[in-house]
Image: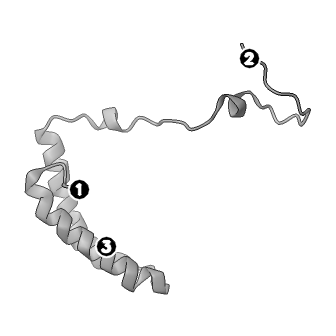
């Protein structure tokens, strides 16, 4: 998948390669220090932020918090009565 900005595609490839290497060669072997990719991530992140500004994308539009609770979860008061929630 390409980055949001065409100018960021090469940086994304570099970061993805770094992350994949870190994940398979270090993280899966118990080394959780992820600072090895921090420098390229910072440059890539700045590029993405610039692309977002240039495309006039409002972050609050993409930061909406969607819930995955169901009607049952919302209606279940935890009383343990075993009754099903009523349909309104």
Q: N-terminal of the two: label 1 or label 2? A: 1
Which labelled disc corresponds to residue 1? 1
The relative height of residue 85 versus residue 32 in the rendered view (above or below) is above
Given residues 6 and 47, the one toward you in this image is 6
Identify the residue under disc 3. Answer: 19
Q: At which x and y percent is residue 57?
A: 21, 35
Residue at the image point whose x is 29% and y is 38% from the top: 59
Q: N-terminal of the two: label 3 or label 2? A: 3
Q: At which x and y percent is residue 34?
A: 37, 76
Is 42 left or right of 78, judged from the image as shown? Answer: left
Q: Secondary structure at mark 1?
A: loop
Residue at the image point whose x is 15% and y is 65% from the top: 11
C-alpha gap between disc 1 and disc 2? 43 Å
Identify the residue under disc 2. Answer: 87
The relative height of residue 84 versus residue 29 in the rendered view (above or below) is above
Residue at the image point whose x is 89% and y is 33% from the top: 82
């Amino acid at each position: 998948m390409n980055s949001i900005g065409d100018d960021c595609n090469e940086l994304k490839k570099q970061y993805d390669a770094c992350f994949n290497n870190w994940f398979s060669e270090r993280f899966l072997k118990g080394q959780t220090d992820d600072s090895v990719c921090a420098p390229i991530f910072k440059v890539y992140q700045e590029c993405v932020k610039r692309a977002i500004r240039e495309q006039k994308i409002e972050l609050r539009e993409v930061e909406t918090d969607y819930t995955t609770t169901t009607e049952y979860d919302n209606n279940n008061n935890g009383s343990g009565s075993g009754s099903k929630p009523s349909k309104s």
